Image (cartoon, rainbow, N blue to C red):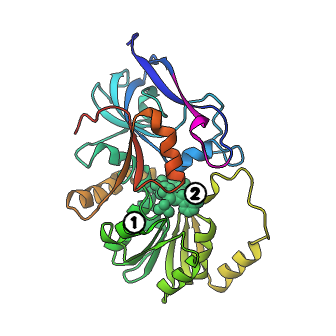
Amino acid sequence: MSNIVNRRMTLQRYPDGMPRDDDFAVVEGEVPDIGEGDVLCRAIYLTVDPYIRVHLNPRLAKGYAPLLPIGGVIPGEAVLQVERSRFPGLKEGDFVAGFGGWQDFCALPGASLRKVDPTLGPLSAHLGALGMPGLTAYAGFTRLAEAEPGQTVFVSAALGGVGAVVGQLARERGCRTIGVSSSAEKCRYAVETLGYDLCLDRNQSDFADLVAKACPEKIDVNFENVGGDVFWAALHSMKDYGRMIMCGLVSDYNNDELPSGPDLAPTLIRYIALKRLVMKGLMVADFFNLYPEFQQVVGAMIRDGRFRHKEYIVEGIDNAGRAMIDMMEGRNFGKTVVRITDDPTL
Ligand SMILES: NC(=O)c1ccc[n+]([C@@H]2O[C@H](COP(=O)([O-])OP(=O)(O)OC[C@H]3O[C@@H](n4cnc5c(N)ncnc54)[C@H](OP(=O)(O)O)[C@@H]3O)[C@@H](O)[C@H]2O)c1
C-alpha cells in the first residue's frame, strides 16, 4: 500500500468555545503497518459524537476522555472494513467497529474491535441506533429508568443518537414520551416519524412554562442529555420519586470555563429532597456486556419497521470538522456520521 495516502483529520488548536473550521486540518500520512495481533482497517463511516468535543476541551478532558494533543488525529469510533489481519478472529473484508479516529486507515489490536453484522441494519447504524449511542440509551432506559407503562418520559436531544432510541423504547413500553429539540421542523419529525407524543422547541422563550404545561401529571423519568436550561425546566416539572438519568450535558462541552453565577447547589438539593428524586449516573462502558441483547432488540425493531432512525450523513473527511460544528449548533437532523468511502453494502 506504499502508494496509497492516509488522509487524517487533525487538531490545529483547542477550540475557543464553539469549534471553527480552521481548528481542524487534513494532513496526509502513510498507511500504518500492523504487528502480530493487529488489524489494518479502512474507514467507511466515522462517528461525530459529543464526547469527541470533550477530548478537545482542556477543562473537561480527563479520565475516560483524555486531552488530545495538538496535531493529534481526532478520536472516535468508526465502522471499518478489514484490509489485512494478523488477528485470528478477523479476515480481510470483515466489517468491524473500533476507535480508529478520523482517518482513512488505522491499525488496531484485533481484540479491541467489535464485529459488525450488516444483516442487523445499515452499516452506518452501527455508530448510532445499533452502536454505542444506542447501547447508552438501551442501558439507561432498561436498567436504570424503571419506567412503567403510562408514565411520562422526558428526552432531551430527542432526535440524536441516544435520544431517538430512548424515545422509541419508551413508546414501545407504553410510556407517554415528550421530546426536546431545537426547531419546529425537528419537533414535527420527532412526533410524526419517531412517534413522540409531544416535542418541545428549547429555543422558545417560555420553554420552562411549555414544559410545565405539557406535563400536568409531571415527569416520571428525565433522560438528561444536554444540561443547562433544559435540565432546570425538567427539574421544576419532576414528579415525586421521579428518576433522572444523568447521561450527558452537551450544552457545557463548548465552555472553556464554568459559567459564572449564583451557587445553584441549594436549589438543586432542595428539589431533590422535597421531591425525593433519584439521580442515576450513566456510563455506557459499564454496560458493554449488553451489546448482544441490545442489538437483538433494536435490530428486530429496525427490521419490522417499529424503529425509525434518521441520519445526518456528511460526505468526505474534509467535512468532518464542519459536521461536528453542525451537531454542536443543532443543525444535524438525526445521528451525525461522515461517509469516508463508498459503502460496499449499498
Ligand atoms: N454517559 C454515557 O456513557 C454517554 C454515552 C453516549 C452519549 N452520551 C451523552 O449523551 C448526549 C447525547 O449524545 P448523542 O450522541 O445522542 O448526541 P446527538 O443528540 O446526536 O447530538 C447532540 C444534540 O444535542 C443538542 N444540543 C446541542 N447543543 C445544545 C445546547 N447548547 N443545549 C441543548 N441541546 C443542545 C442538539 O439537539 P437538538 O437540536 O435536537 O436540540 C444536538 O443535535 C450527550 O450529552 C453525550 O455526551 C453519554
Say what secondary structure mark 1 lies in: helix
Instruction: Looking at this view, name the residue that lies furthest to the bottom.
Output: 216
Check disc 1 and report the residue beneath it.
185
Give the total of numbered labels: 2
308 relative to 131, above or below? below
The percent coordinates of residue 183 (x first, y second) are: 46, 66
Residue sitting at x 40%, y 25%: 39
Residue sitting at x 59%, y 35%: 22
Quarter in which the C terminus is drawn: top left
The percent coordinates of residue 72 (x first, y second) are: 60, 29
Residue 164, picture quadrant: bottom left
Name the side, left or right, on which 195 lies relative to 331. left
- Residue 67 is one of the magenta-drawn residues: no
Q: Amino acid at mark 2?
A: Val
Quarter in which the N terminus is drawn: top left
The percent coordinates of residue 151 (x first, y second) are: 42, 82
Disc 2 within 8 angstroms of ligand 1 (CB): yes
Residue sitting at x 38%, y 71%: 170
Name the side, left or right, on which 210 lies relative to 91. right
Q: Amino acid at mark 1?
A: Glu
Say what secondary structure mark 2 lies in: helix
Mark 1: give few (<14), some (14-19) or many (20+) Cα within 10 Å. Answer: few
The percent coordinates of residue 112 (x first, y second) are: 45, 35
Q: Earlier in the sequence, mark 2 or mark 1?
A: 1
Mark 2: give few (<14), some (14-19) or many (20+) Cα within 10 Å. Answer: many
Question: Start and end of the magenta stretch?
Answer: 17-27
Q: Nearer the viewer, mark 2 or mark 1?
A: 1
Check disc 2 and report the residue beneath it.
250
Any part of residue 2 in sight: yes
